[in-house]
Image (cartoon, rainbow, N blue to C red):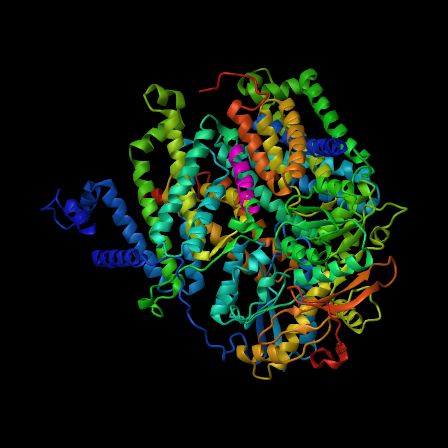
Amino acid sequence: MASSVKQRGAAPAPSAPPERGGIAARWAAMPLLARHLLGALAAFAAVVALTSMTDSLTDLRIASIGYYTLAVAGLGLLVGFSGQISLGHGAFMFIGAYTTALLVTNVPMVPLWLNLVITVVASCVAGVLVGAASARLHGPYLAGATLTLAVGLPAVALRFPEVLGGSNGLSFSTRGAPPALAGVIPDTRWQAWAVWLAVLLALVALATISKGRLGRQMRAIRDDESAAALAGIKVGRTKVVAFVISAGCGGLAGGLQAYLLGTATPSSFSVVLSLSLLAALILGGMGSLWGALWGALALVYFEVWGETLADALELESKVSNNLPIVLYGVILIAVVLAWPQGIQGALSRLRRRWQRR
Amino acid sequence: MDHFINLTLSGLANGAIYAALALSLIIIYQATRVVNFAQPALALISAYVAYTVTGATGSYWLGFGSALVTGLVLGVLTERLLIRPVHNKSPLSAIVITLGVLLTLQGTAGMIWSNEPHSFGYALDYRGMFSPADAFAVGSVLLVAVLLLALYRWTPLGLRMRAAAFRPEVARMVGVRVGLMLTVGWGIASLVGALGGVLAAPPFLSPNVLDTAFVYGITAAVVGGLDNPFGAIFGGFLLGVSLSYVSSYAGPELVTLAALVILVLVLSVRPDGLFSRPQARKV
Amino acid sequence: MQSRKLTIAAAGAATLLLTSCAGAGDVEDTGSSELDVAPGVTEDTVVIGSHQPLTGPAAPGYLQISIGAGAVYDYINENGGVHGREIEYVVEDDGYDPTRTVEVTRDLVLREEIFAMVGGLGTPTHSKVLDFLNEEGVPDLFVSSGALMWNQPEEYPLTYGYQVDYTKESKVQGAFIAENFPDAKVGYLQQNDDVGTDSRAGLDQYLSDNVVSQQSYESSSTNISPQMAELKDAGVEVLVCSCIPAFTALAMLEAQAIDWQPQFVVSSIGADTATLMGLLKEFGGENLPADQMLDGMISTGYLPQITMSDDPWITFYRKVHEEMGVEEPFTNTMLYGMVQATQFARALEAAGPEPTRQSLLDAVNSNDFSGPGLVPFVATEDDHAGYDGAFVSQFNAGGTPEILQEPMVTDRGEGPLESFDLERPTPREIDILTE
């Protein structure tokens, strides 16, 4: 794949001098998908490089950032592009996690990639159902309906305890590094790579979609639904498609979480999770995959930093127990008040100011 | 038959709580187009204040009163300090700010009063079928609904508030202080929310105690229709009674799922809730 | 340079894809890890860890456990520690969410480098880290849950139970009810998880002919009036409550509300009378104080209760509570954590002056750690049960509880109940606890 990309990229400017402008021009001339794939490959290289320096706990956290990035990015496509607010994305993570968990526990010989493909399909099917059911809903009605979905769906696991493990959920182990590499690459690092590889492939798809025709249609609907309809865009169908893509991302994120942590339990998919995803989206900044990354970083690390701070301050236990959540709340408010475009918005403003100098 | 009546009555008492929370949500939604996720936290702090005041003075009603005042003050402060700066920007910013307030206040409650549960009494005797406490819940919520109706319909303040919410430009031209009206709206809404909180918290008060009731509050508001206070009241009671039946006849593990089913059923027939007035959507 | 990195990454990605063709659930046995090591042990400290719900919806009720354990460790440290080492007790908040349990447990093991996990709390949570702890070779002592899965020495050689498991305890309850209320109509109110199913397995052995109504509750929904109404309508006279304290209290309130006075029989997990009184404080009114509401409640237990004022261990723990300046009130839930800490400290002492993980496990397996509980404490190579039986007592408002049936041990199958002889040491006889 990579070699064909290079050929195609090189073709338009065979005699270009190897200067900065040349590379930039060549980059710009590449097809969108190729650019995204190369970007993903670079990101994967960065993850591999980063994890080769970190301990296994950090590897786990890096992997968590991966699947949260995907979940937040998927939500970003729905909210940012088609303007539908979903407060129930935890429900799709629930579906993804249980699909993967059931496959791993019941048919252990299925390879991971096939597991994840099935997971994505399952959550897309759920996305079609929810998207079609909620296509006529707008604004807060959709928000309310999806919120209730996030609260209601985990009860399915309670209803069928024999299959889904009831409130104790399912626990299982997943395969780590292949035997040939055992001892060379720790299992968690291997799993972190697998998670990120899947995440990056999904992000490539997401980025390509959002830059393409479908993305333009979604934005048109968000900006003016009636005008979009007049322009011949099938509003209902596009909205459902946005929902399905976003559900697929959420489901894959949930599946990867289950693969990484070896658990699928109803209490992990509470309303808090769904609301945190939305908060992370706004905190990081909508409309950019970088924003999703910052949001995911915040989801994973604010808690850790809060606890470190609480330990360092040696406060009374009831104060220090609650410090991380208060801290998260305060930062959330402060960021939204100071930079309504989120962290990514602030960064790009900073960059523009820098470039102007 | 007795059992059925019992279920209905206890469902009504719970429904009153959902109705109060739904009412609080839609007042704010109508005034500022924000779904207020901070509401359970504002109500929570109010309930804790009631707990503290009742503990200090020995009087339930002093605690009750101070909870309502706390709700009012917190609502006003939230609107003035946090929601106003993002007003007219993006509804998402406001939603996320209310989420931030939710986390901050729930954590603060844990810091001050600890995460251990506290015994928190009912207004009146809780014993008996449709006890005085249940009757008080239903009665006070209905009374509040009537008072709100009177306020909005027949007082100059209510008229200004409606004008500020639905036609801010026009209202401003005729001399209505639109900002003030929105603040008042938040204050009143949070007061109603505090009432819901004090009714919902018993018997035990802890930082997450209102979460579930709040979710049902949102469900009730959406079922009833977000631009109709009667919808919220009806939605609350409908949900309370239905969930009571489900819990008994189908099993308690299905209650949250049942709320989802009810919501889906209602919205698939009426996408804007049961009682929304058919209106041309602004495009 | 850039492109070479990219090529490597591409090759890596391709390998990953190809090798991921092996089944995702096909996990090889990685073999056992080295146990003759002592991470977390220095000249003057031993670091141990635990995961507990400190915030979130499940925190209420469980906070006191780690506070109690912490107080005992503080007391031991102030009195010279264990073999001169202070115990450093690191508690991490998992909010009862298994995904966070996985993370904080790795944090404890890999970053804090704990010597052992002690009293990790909860079935849904701790079950997700069993594999990890056993693979990493971390002793996983005295899990805070009565689920049956902690006692699987073959599969999880490093995991040991603590409290009596739900099935054994409910067999004691069932036998007691069958003998003392032979003709009564019995009803169950049970938490809808393994607490409920495991308890039912024990109760049904003795009561299947007497049961007229079985109800369950979901710990996320505090409205249990429909269930209570059904139990009352079925004519239940003896209500067996396999519930956590908040739901025991709710059940009692609801019974008051519908004017129904069944005989309550409550499992140890929900029978902490001090906690129950705190929860019920506001509801009795002038003529019915909280302790009167609890009067006559029958419960099973394995630890002494804080109202047993002549028990030397209760006197001792009360002193610890006072001297360590614990703000929260002294309750049986706190006592649970205190006894857990005591049992760990005794095991650590028995592991010798230069403890390793192996010597700790050997010490747990080969020593008799009877007391502070009133039933034998079983921890051997082939049986990781922890407390192994239960007694039946009745709460008396204002007085000491009356023992209705002496402690008995049993198995989790269909075996009989048996009495036993137990030498309980007093706190004075235990070196690390003396000043």
Above or below: residue A128 compared with residue C429: above
Look at the image and give the residue range highlighted in magenta.
Answer: A145-158
Residue B235: give x, y in percent of width and height: 63, 27
* Nearer the observer, B180 or A23: A23
Residue B237 figure quarter: top right
**Residue A147 counted in the magenta span:** yes
Q: Residue furthest front?
A: C209
Q: How many labels does the image show?
A: 0
Residue at (25, 49) in percent of width and height: A38
Q: In which quarter of the image is the C terminus of chain A?
A: top left
Residue A24: give x, y in percent of width and height: 21, 45
**Residue B256 counted in the magenta span:** no
Above or below: residue A166 compared with residue A340: below
From where the camera sits, is residue A96 visible? Answer: yes
* Nearer the observer, C105 or B67: C105
Residue at (38, 44) in percent of width and height: A120
Residue at (31, 54) in percent of width and height: A44
Q: In this view, does C109 lie to the left or right of A111?
A: right
From where the camera sits, is residue A74 visible? Answer: no
Residue A26: give x, y in percent of width and height: 18, 44
Task: Look at the magenta stretch and give its main secondary structure.
Answer: helix
Q: Which residue lies furthest to the bottom in this view?
A: C353
* Nearer the observer, B219 or A51: B219
Residue C244 figure quarter: bottom right
Residue C224: give x, y in percent of width and height: 71, 42
